[in-house]
Image: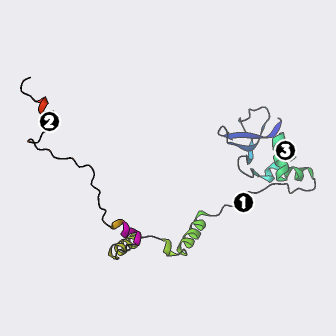
């Protein structure tokens, strides 16, 4: 039986994740597996590569042949160099930095908020006090406001002249003759 160390694809269409497995070379890519020895996720930065080094060494010594992709991953982790006895067996694997805990970040934000000056904060009581102070303060009138406040004398425009019924113009009198 020809044994291969290869990748099994998982994940959605554009978000692949792989398992590094030991399987019979005659089986389908996602078919029957002998053993799972690691994981590979290329989507993260840097890529996540986890290999059980002890099991990888065991299968390589038993004669399992890695595919090209798995061989590249084993070189990155340093397992291939260890198997071949090549110097520089540590590999070039980059680790993902640990994320800070959410609770620590929250507590730091609360501490920062507590130390902020309260002058900038506006509360309902402060708004009510400001409105009350604005109402009770005497109104100061500036010079430009006094000039506008002076009464403006209106110029008489053409006011309609009231005409009584007794004083009708002569043109109207001609138009109302009883003869017609």
Q: Nearer the viewer, mark 2 or mark 1?
A: 2
Quadrant in the picture for the C terminus: top left
Instruction: Determine the CA span between mark 3 and mark 2.
Output: 121 Å
Front residue of this view, candidates 155 and 177: 177
* Residue 8 higher or lower than 137, as above or below: above
Region of the chain picked out in magenta, as a range: 141-147
Name the N-terminal-most of marks 2 and 1.
1
* Residue 180 higher or lower than 115, as above or below: above
- Element type at mark 2: helix
Residue on which disc 3 sits: 71
Q: Nearer the viewer, mark 3 or mark 1?
A: 1
Q: Nearer the viewer, mark 3 or mark 2?
A: 2
Residue on which disc 2 sits: 170
Instruction: Decide: few, some or many residues near mark 2? Use Cα within 10 Å; few <14, some 14-19, many ≥20.
Output: few
Residue 19, located in which quarter of the rendered image? Answer: top right
Confirm or deny contact between disc 2 and disc 1 (CB under 8 A). no
């Amino acid at each position: 039986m020809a044994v291969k160390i290869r990748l099994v694809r998982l994940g959605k269409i554009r978000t692949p994740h792989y398992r590094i497995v030991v399987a019979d070379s005659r089986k389908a890519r996602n078919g029957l597996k002998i053993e799972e020895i690691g994981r590979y996720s290329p989507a993260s930065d840097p890529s996540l590569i986890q290999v059980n080094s002890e099991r990888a060494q065991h299968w390589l010594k038993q004669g399992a042949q890695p595919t090209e992709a798995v061989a590249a991953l084993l070189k990155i982790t340093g397992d291939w160099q260890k198997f071949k006895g090549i110097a520089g067996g540590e590999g070039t694997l980059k680790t993902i930095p640990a994320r800070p805990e959410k609770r620590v970040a929250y507590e730091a934000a609360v501490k920062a908020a507590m130390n902020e000056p309260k002058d900038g904060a506006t509360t309902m009581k402060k708004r009510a006090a400001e409105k009350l102070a604005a109402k009770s303060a005497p109104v100061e009138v500036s010079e430009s406001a006094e000039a506008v406040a002076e009464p403006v004398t209106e110029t008489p425009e053409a006011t309609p002249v009231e005409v009584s019924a007794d004083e009708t113009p002569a043109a109207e009198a001609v138009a109302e003759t009883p003869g017609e």
